[in-house]
């Protein structure tokens, strides 16, 4: 049996999006939609699941945005926190809490992590040479200084990394440095500054043992994790900035410095669990069972770029706390690129190219089900995928609408019209009827099996496969013909069809929550939301049968088809950079 039965509860996290911009479709396909599908499935199963996420609100780029716009950093994070929470809502991504790292509670959690690591001897101080602007009277971390990359010669490289070639280097190696602050592009000078470092190399052995104990993980995640674990060294966890969690020490060197965002951001998962427990009246330590009890299972969903943090660095920080559980799986997805119709090639989504599609732009134009269907059917699981307008309409119209939507609609409308809105009583079942009915439990289990294995594309294909089999049956039995000659046979056929529709309703719920809710209302069946406390196994109820005489509500089209002209119009706007 799958491992989930040995755990009492599952804590699922999705990477905290940075509150410095609007989330786009690539984010959703990577860290959020697969997690939400998994969580919805587990909740349906009646398992205790908690799904936490929130905004990552500290870091140098946010203060730079604020400086450029002439507003406060708080204004920047409030804007994007609100906008991104709305975008997730529009796609029905159902977090139990969407928290904020700017909460005072988060400073408390982060400082507790820091202190514990410090007590364990895992933190050291190092003297560094950093760029300092005489004109602005401040040190210039990260993007506050620009210059020429020492590796590739790119002339707009950041203080410690190059966007062009991906190189990371010591700030002093930057060539031709210049301050990058509105009103200050002076040449900075190197000055000594003391910073705090996490001694990651101390955790190499423990991380390796933990990685070795998980042969079931995806190859892409393990590959990246092993490449890091063999080369761990002390990593700076502080920055010269006044925007961030204060360093919990009275050392004089801490003045003008804050904790570096890569250290505090993943701790946001813990903070948000704490806040969720407080909101629920579970007390100050109501969160601990999720993070410290060995019967709890922790699963991170992330994009590929976040693998080192979730499969090496954050686990080291958790091990250093002494009493936290380690993640049971880290689901890292590849990238969703963007297909360029002009060049006929997929390219990376980027702000400067203007080819990105923000969720707020896209979700205004399409249903959450259409978006979720396409992003899951085309999920970048094992390799990069690309958003392509033609594929979007072809797959949604050709698979979800034509296969599942069409079967459900013609079954229900024929039943509704010909049998007074009730599930007809079946006569004697023939071989076709029996074969389809008896195959249902296996077909439902096959979807579940893929979901348990985090194979979301495969799970969705298996769901569509139920619709294909049902359509074949429908076409063979031709109830629109038998209706004129043999009402008893027609009744039996539609009885069988209603049972498949019932099975489809539950199995679609993790992927397509809006369509499932509409269908459940027509069928008059319950789809319990589930949650952190667990409950009954409603997934298994997918194999229950609707009894003859069961009343249906008026059928509606679950998945309206997309119009080709509308797609072309939007594709043109996208190409013009309007979708960002
Ligand atoms: Zn470079």
Image (spheres, rainbow, N blue to C red):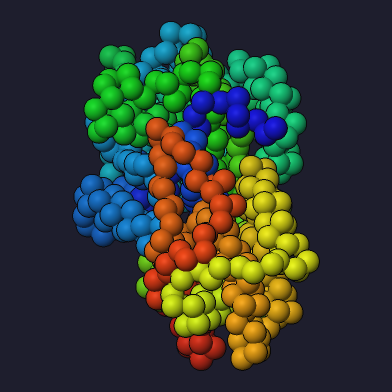
What residue appears at the point 71 percent right and 73 percent down from the top-left corner?
473
Q: Tell me the quarter of the image containing the N terminus.
A: top right
Residue 368: quarter of image: bottom left
Q: Position of residue 154 (x, y in %)?
A: 59, 57
Q: Tell me the quarter of the image containing the C terminus.
A: bottom left
Query: In this rendering, is residue 525 above or below 479?
Result: above
Residue sitting at the far right: 431
Q: Position of residue 392 (x, y in %)?
A: 58, 75
Instruction: Please state if 10 lies on the left or on the right of 280 as rendered.
Output: right
What residue appears at the point 42 percent right and 13 percent down from the top-left corner?
116
Instruction: Please state if 531 lies on the left or on the right of 241 as rendered.
Output: right
Q: Position of residue 499 (x, y in %)?
A: 58, 62
Query: Can residue 171 be seen from the camera position used here?
Result: no
Query: Which residue is more in the foreground, 469 or 183?
Result: 469
What residue appears at the point 56 percent right and 68 percent down from the top-left corner?
425
What residue appears at the point 63 percent right and 47 percent down from the top-left corner?
448
Query: Which residue is more in the foreground, 245 or 455?
Result: 455
Query: Can residue 4 be seen from the camera position used here?
Result: yes
Instruction: Please state if 186 lies on the left or on the right of 561 as rendered.
Output: left
Query: In this rendering, is residue 311 above or below 473?
Result: above
Q: Position of residue 77 (x, y in %)?
A: 29, 50
């Amino acid at each position: 049996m799958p491992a989930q039965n040995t755990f009492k509860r599952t804590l699922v996290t999705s990477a905290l999006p940075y509150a410095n911009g609007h989330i786009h479709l690539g984010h959703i396909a990577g860290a959020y939609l697969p997690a939400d599908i998994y969580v919805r499935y587990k909740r349906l199963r009646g398992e205790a699941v908690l799904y936490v996420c929130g905004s990552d609100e500290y870091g140098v780029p946010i203060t730079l945005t604020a400086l450029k716009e002439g507003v406060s950093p708080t204004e920047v994070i409030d804007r994007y926190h609100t906008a991104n929470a709305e975008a997730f809502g529009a796609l029905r991504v159902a977090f139990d809490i969407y928290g904020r790292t700017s909460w005072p509670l988060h400073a408390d959690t982060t400082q507790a992590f820091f202190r514990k690591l410090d007590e364990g001897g895992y933190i050291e101080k190092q003297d560094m040479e950093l760029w300092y602007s005489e004109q602005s009277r401040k040190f210039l971390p990260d993007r506050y200084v620009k210059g020429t990359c020492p590796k590739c010669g790119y002339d707009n490289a950041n203080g410690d990394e190059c966007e062009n070639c991906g190189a990371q280097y010591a700030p002093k190696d930057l060539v031709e440095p210049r301050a990058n602050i509105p009103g200050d592009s002076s040449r900075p000078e190197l000055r000594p500054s003391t910073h705090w470092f996490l001694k990651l190399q101390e955790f190499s052995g423990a991380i390796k043992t933990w990685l070795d104990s998980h042969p079931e993980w995806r190859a892409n995640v393990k590959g990246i994790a092993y490449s890091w674990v063999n080369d761990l060294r002390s990593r700076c966890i502080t920055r010269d900035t006044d925007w961030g969690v204060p360093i919990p020490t009275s050392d004089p060197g801490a003045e003008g410095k804050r904790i570096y965002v890569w250290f505090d951001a993943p701790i946001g998962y813990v903070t948000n669990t704490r806040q969720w427990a407080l909101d629920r009246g579970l007390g100050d330590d109501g969160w601990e069972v999720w993070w410290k009890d060995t019967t709890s299972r922790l699963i991170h969903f992330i994009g590929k770029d976040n693998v080192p943090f979730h499969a090496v660095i954050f686990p080291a920080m958790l091990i250093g706390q002494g009493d936290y559980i380690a993640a049971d799986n880290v689901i890292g997805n590849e990238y969703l690129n963007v297909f360029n119709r002009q060049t006929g090639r997929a390219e990376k989504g980027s702000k400067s190219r203007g080819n990105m599609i923000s969720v707020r732009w896209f979700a205004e134009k399409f249903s959450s089900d259409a978006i979720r269907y396409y992003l899951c059917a085309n999920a970048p699981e094992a390799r990069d995928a690309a958003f392509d307008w033609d594929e979007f309409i072809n797959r949604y119209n050709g698979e979800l609408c034509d296969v599942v939507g069409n079967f459900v609609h013609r079954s229900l409308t024929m039943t509704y019209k010909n049998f007074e809105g009730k599930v007809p009583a079946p006569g004697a079942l023939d071989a076709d009827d029996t074969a389809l009915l008896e195959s249902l439990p296996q077909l439902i289990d096959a979807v579940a099996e893929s979901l348990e294995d985090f194979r979301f594309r495969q799970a969705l294909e298996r769901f569509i496969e139920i619709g294909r089999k049902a359509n074949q049956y429908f076409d063979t039995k031709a109830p629109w013909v038998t209706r004129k000659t043999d009402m008893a046979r027609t009744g039996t056929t539609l009885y069988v069809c209603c049972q498949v529709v019932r099975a489809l309703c539950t199995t679609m719920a993790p992927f397509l929550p809006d369509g499932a809710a509409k269908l459940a209302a027509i069928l008059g069946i319950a789809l319990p939301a589930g949650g952190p406390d667990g409950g009954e196994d409603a997934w298994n109820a997918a194999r229950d049968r609707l009894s003859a005489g069961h009343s249906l509500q008026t059928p509606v089209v679950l998945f309206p088809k997309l119009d080709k002209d509308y797609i072309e119009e939007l594709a043109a706007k996208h190409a013009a950079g309007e979708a960002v």
